[in-house]
């Protein structure tokens, strides 16, 4: 499996997120990269010159529910901020099916052909993240997925309940 990378770019109002390889917490993408993506997306939607959001998954080989939830948050923010649907490029049938199974096609226009994007991609620098921040980010991502459909709500109900319990009762710090 290819190591996971999260890349971003912006050019003339076009903002691109590109996920490459195996983008799962259990693989090669630590919470520091995921937190950087989350923070970048939050800052992005505060910018004045935002016109279009594209998520390029053409080179993605694997993705977990945490990152699918972050994509859902980006899709919701794009719809609210731009009053239009963001675009996902997905040329991998397995990934495209996963997007549809998780109801992300409700948030994104999915294009199944490769596209050259005019922006120069760069890797986000890692961002330090505490255990509680990682837990909160994971909880919010899963809630975003659960909000998309009844099937997702049922699928992630136990995960969300567990994360909420952990978030409400953080582990003691070693001292």
Image: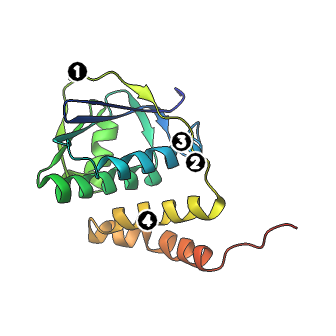
Name the colour scheme. rainbow
Q: Residue at x 44, y 44 (%)?
A: 37
Query: Is residue 166 or residue 61 the one in the foreground?
Result: 166
What SS does tag 1 mark?
Answer: loop
What SS does tag 4 mark?
Answer: helix
**Label 3 to label 4: alpha-carbon separation:** 16 Å
Disc 2 crowd, CA 10 A, few/some/many (<14, 14-19, 20+): many
**Label 1 to label 2: alpha-carbon separation:** 28 Å
List the residue tagged with mark 3.
Answer: 33
Tell me which numbered mark, 3 or 4, is placed earlier along the sequence.
3
Residue 165 sits in which quadrant? bottom right
The percent position of residue 146, horizontal first and vertical second, equals 35, 67
The answer to whether mark 4 and mark 2 are in CB contact below 8 A is no
The percent position of residue 87, horizontal first and vertical second, equals 19, 41
What SS does tag 2 mark?
Answer: helix
List the residue tagged with mark 4.
Answer: 140
List the residue tagged with mark 1.
Answer: 118
Tell me which numbered mark, 1 or 3, is placed earlier along the sequence.
3
Q: Residue at x 28, y 40 (%)?
A: 96
The answer to whether mark 4 and mark 1 are in CB contact below 8 A is no
- Marker disc for residue 4: none
**Viewer-side label of 4, 1:** 1
Tell me which numbered mark, 4 or 2, is placed earlier along the sequence.
2
Question: Residue 89, can we see it?
Answer: no
Q: How many marks?
A: 4
List the residue tagged with mark 2.
Answer: 31
- Relative to 117, say whether 161 is above or below: below
Q: Which residue is drawn at 54% across and 28% down?
A: 3
Tell me which numbered mark, 1 or 2, is placed earlier along the sequence.
2
The answer to whether mark 2 and mark 3 are in CB contact below 8 A is yes
């Amino acid at each position: 499996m290819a190591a996971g990378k999260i890349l971003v770019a912006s050019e003339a109002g076009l903002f691109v997120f590109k996920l490459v390889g195996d983008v799962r917490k259990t693989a090669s993408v630590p919470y520091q990269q995921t937190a950087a993506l989350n923070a970048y997306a939050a800052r992005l939607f505060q910018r004045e010159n935002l016109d279009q959001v594209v998520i390029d998954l053409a080179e993605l080989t694997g993705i977990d529910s945490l990152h699918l939830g972050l994509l859902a948050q980006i899709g919701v923010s794009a719809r609210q901020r731009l009053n239009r649907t963001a675009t996902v490029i997905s040329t991998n049938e397995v990934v495209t099916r996963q997007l549809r199974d998780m109801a992300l096609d409700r948030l994104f226009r999915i294009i199944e052909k490769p596209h050259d994007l005019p922006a120069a991609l760069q890797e986000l620098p890692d961002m330090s993240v505490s255990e509680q921040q990682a837990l909160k980010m994971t909880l919010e991502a899963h809630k975003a997925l659960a909000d998309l459909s009844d099937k997702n709500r049922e699928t992630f109900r136990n995960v969300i309940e567990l994360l909420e319990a952990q978030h409400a009762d953080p582990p003691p710090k070693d001292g």
